[in-house]
Image (spheres, rainbow, N blue to C red):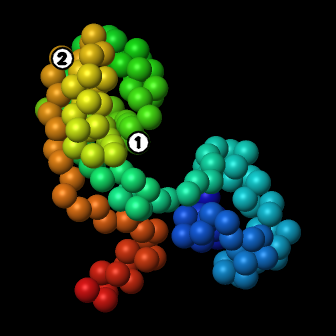
Amino acid sequence: MDETDRAIIEVLRSDARASMTTLAEEVHISRAGAHARVKRLRDSGVITGFTVRTDPVRFGQHASAYVTLSVEQPAWQDVRARLMRIPEVEHIALVGGEFDVLLLVRARDNRDLRRVVLEEVQAIPSVRTSRTLLIFEDFPNLPAGERRAAALNS
């Protein structure tokens, strides 16, 4: 990956719906060059897909939490497969340290969050312990350029 590829990715992180013409103009390359580079980035697995970011509260998810799990290590693949079937689990990370897994869970409300953690996550046989950290306020996952601009303006 070179600087042009990185610039393409930043533009697409900011607006995944950007046209090839807009993308080409933003990174100062031809439209054909932009198309070829995006295709190469997709084919090589650097770009794995295009998505929509939503505001969780406006989307109806009024309760969010990070949930840490300690799991029986040999059963990690099974735990991951079961977690992936829980719609409220937005992100799963296998981590090193005090716990084994970090989840981002988003639910309709606190009652729903409680149900997800106690009845679905903790019901997985290889989950030994969990700890729930409530999120009081979310800040959007801004692309690097927007983060820098926001930091300068604050």
Residue 17 appearing in the image: yes
Query: What is the crowding at mark 2: few (fewer than 14 residues within 10 Å), some, or many (at least 20)?
Result: few
Q: Do callouts 2 and 1 mark residues in contact (Cβ within 8 Å)?
A: no
Coordinates of residue 49 in the picture (x, y in percent): 63, 49
Coordinates of residue 38 in the picture (x, y in percent): 72, 59
Q: What residue type is labelled 1?
A: Glu
Residue 19's place in the image compared with 120, above or below, is below
Left or right relative to 54: residue 100: left
Comparing marks 2 and 1, which lies closer to the viewer? 1
Q: Nearer the viewer, residue 141 or 114?
A: 114
Residue 71 appearing in the image: no
> Can you tell which quarter of the image residue 17 is in?
bottom right
* Residue extending furthest toward the bottom: 153
Query: What is the crowding at mark 1: few (fewer than 14 residues within 10 Å), some, or many (at least 20)?
Result: some
Q: Which amino acid does label 2 sit on?
A: Arg
Left or right relative to 32: residue 53: left
Q: Nearer the viewer, residue 143 or 114?
A: 114
Residue 26's place in the image compared with 127, above or below, is below
Q: Residue at x 81, y 68 (%)?
A: 33
Question: On residue 90, which mark appears?
Answer: 1
Instruction: Identify the secondary structure beneath mark 2.
Output: strand
> Can you tell which quarter of the image residue 122 is in?
top left
- State the separation of the CA atoms marked 2 and 1: 21 Å
Left or right relative to 74: residue 127: left
Q: Nearer the viewer, residue 127 or 60?
A: 60
Quarter that holds the C terminus:
bottom left
Question: On residue 128, which mark appears?
Answer: 2
Q: Which residue is drawn at 23% across and 38% down?
A: 111
